[in-house]
Image: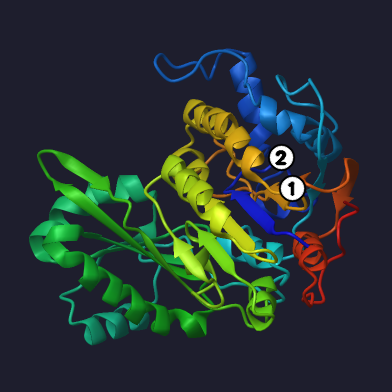
């Protein structure tokens, strides 16, 4: 039985999904376009990285073959080929390209409904919604009320928010209401309380998440988002792999924003950190204490928030290479019989127009099982089915276990 791990490289898509055109994403390819830019020298940045994309450890696990199966081509720099483990790619059944959808499906529950979204208008939020939130929270009003980049909107409204005490409300192409406020001027705990209030008010609109986006700084120094983000997600409406593990009395450790994504239901010991490196450290420190039959579920969010949404190709490439360099540290402390799956929840192609996620296939790289390639999988839920089989717990009823 041993143990099982799923590690999510947030937004690391490997090619446009079959239905990408319906989302405006036909031709998107997070990995492929990063690799092509690196090969062309377009992702070189002094002091950060140079040359072709170098991911020897992910390549050894079959990332190149997975990308080839998904798109028909091996991305430049990944030609060396698989030397261990098994690999393929997975198709998302759930509609949309949101974080909750991807993670819930990875955990064995494809989303059976359409999320609610806010329109591309100004204001984008219903007046009645804003009035209700302001009344309950005792706010003098809100700023923003539009689709926007999180860094750009605090630059636009940060000074006014600090001066007036009005938080900044904004959204994106995701099913989300984001609220930004100054950590000191507005108060961090007050921001969290406000997001909890907003969460209740958007439930009837089928909005996936309310996200607290605290920032610091001043008008003269500029404003910077902090690591104290908190997601308020609607809980999955049915059992996920996490629920099945809890009912079976198994130990679960969740790293990064996994706890928030599942509304802290059956998420066990929750460990958070300021960036990918800190999260990797916490994962390495926690793994030796994970009991036989236990499960570790980790999300590494920097790929998405710092580089994908900001359309920073060089930054994304450097983050991939940094993650790859640390991967042997994880592989070396796996025990015999442990199962590791490395995957993603959607794409966020840093070469694409706009700032939103992209509808893509995701890699499925497996260490600890049989070796080989398994090609296309018709649902992210295949990963949960594989873990359920490995740990000998009840499956969710969705997905088919991988041939590993």
Work out whether residue 399 or residue 338 is closer to the camera in this orientation and state it: 338
Q: Viewed as shown, does residue 151 lie left or right of 165?
A: right
| Circles 2 and 1: CB atoms closer than 8 Å | yes
Mark 1 neighbour class, 10 Å CA radius: few under 14, some 14 to 19, many 20 or more: many
Q: Residue at x 85, y 58 (%)?
A: 378
Q: Viewed as shown, does residue 401 lie left or right of 130?
A: right
100 versus 37 height, above or below:
below
Residue beneath label 1, please? Answer: 361
**Residue 373's image quarter?**
top right
Q: Viewed as shown, does residue 365 lie left or right of 217?
A: right
Mark 2 neighbour class, 10 Å CA radius: few under 14, some 14 to 19, many 20 or more: many
Decide which of tag 2 and tag 1 comes sooner along the chain: 2
Q: Residue at x 35, y 59 (%)?
A: 229
Could you tell me which secondary element the residue under label 1 belongs to? Answer: loop
Residue 345 seen by the camera: no
Residue beneath label 2, please? Answer: 14
């Amino acid at each position: 039985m041993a143990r099982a791990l799923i590690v999510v490289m947030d937004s690391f898509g490997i090619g446009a999904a079959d239905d990408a055109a319906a989302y405006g994403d036909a031709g998107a390819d997070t990995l492929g376009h990063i690799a092509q830019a690196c090969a062309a020298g377009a992702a070189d940045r002094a002091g950060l990285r140079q040359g072709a994309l170098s991911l020897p450890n992910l390549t050894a696990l079959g990332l190149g073959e997975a990308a080839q199966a998904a798109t028909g081509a091996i991305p430049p720099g990944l030609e060396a080929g698989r030397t261990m483990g098994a690999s393929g790619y997975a198709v998302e059944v759930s509609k949309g390209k949101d974080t909750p959808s991807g993670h819930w499906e990875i955990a064995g529950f494809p989303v059976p409904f359409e999320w609610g979204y806010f329109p591309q208008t100004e204001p984008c939020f219903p007046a009645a919604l804003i009035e209700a939130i302001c009344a309950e929270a005792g706010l003098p009003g809100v700023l923003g009320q539009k689709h926007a980049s999180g860094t750009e909107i605090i630059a636009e409204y940060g000074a006014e928010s600090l001066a007036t005490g009005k938080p900044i409300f904004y959204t994106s192409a995701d099913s989300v209401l984001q609220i930004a406020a100054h950590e000191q001027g507005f108060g961090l705990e007050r921001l969290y309380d406000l997001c909890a209030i907003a969460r209740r008010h958007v439930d009837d609109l089928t909005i996936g998440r309310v996200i607290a986006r605290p920032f610091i700084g001043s008008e003269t120094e500029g404003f910077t988002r902090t690591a104290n983000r908190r997601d308020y997600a609607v809980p999955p409406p049915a059992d996920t792999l996490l629920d099945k593990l809890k009912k079976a009395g198994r130990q679960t450790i969740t790293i990064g924003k996994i706890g928030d994504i599942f509304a802290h239901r059956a998420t066990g010991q929750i460990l958070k950190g300021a960036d990918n490196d800190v999260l990797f450290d916490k994962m390495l420190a926690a793994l030796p204490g994970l009991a036989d039959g236990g499960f570790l579920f980790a999300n590494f969010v920097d790929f998405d928030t710092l580089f994908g949404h900001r359309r920073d190709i060089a930054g994304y490439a450097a983050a991939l290479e940094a993650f790859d360099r640390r991967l042997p540290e994880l592989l070396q402390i796996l025990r015999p019989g442990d199962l590791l799956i490395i995957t993603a929840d959607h794409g966020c192609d840093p070469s694409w127009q706009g700032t939103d996620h992209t509808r893509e296939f995701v890699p499925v790289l497996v260490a600890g099982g049989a070796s080989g390639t398994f090609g296309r999988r018709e649902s992210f839920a295949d990963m949960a089915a594989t873990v359920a089989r490995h740990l000998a717990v009840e499956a969710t009823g969705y997905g088919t276990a991988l041939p590993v």
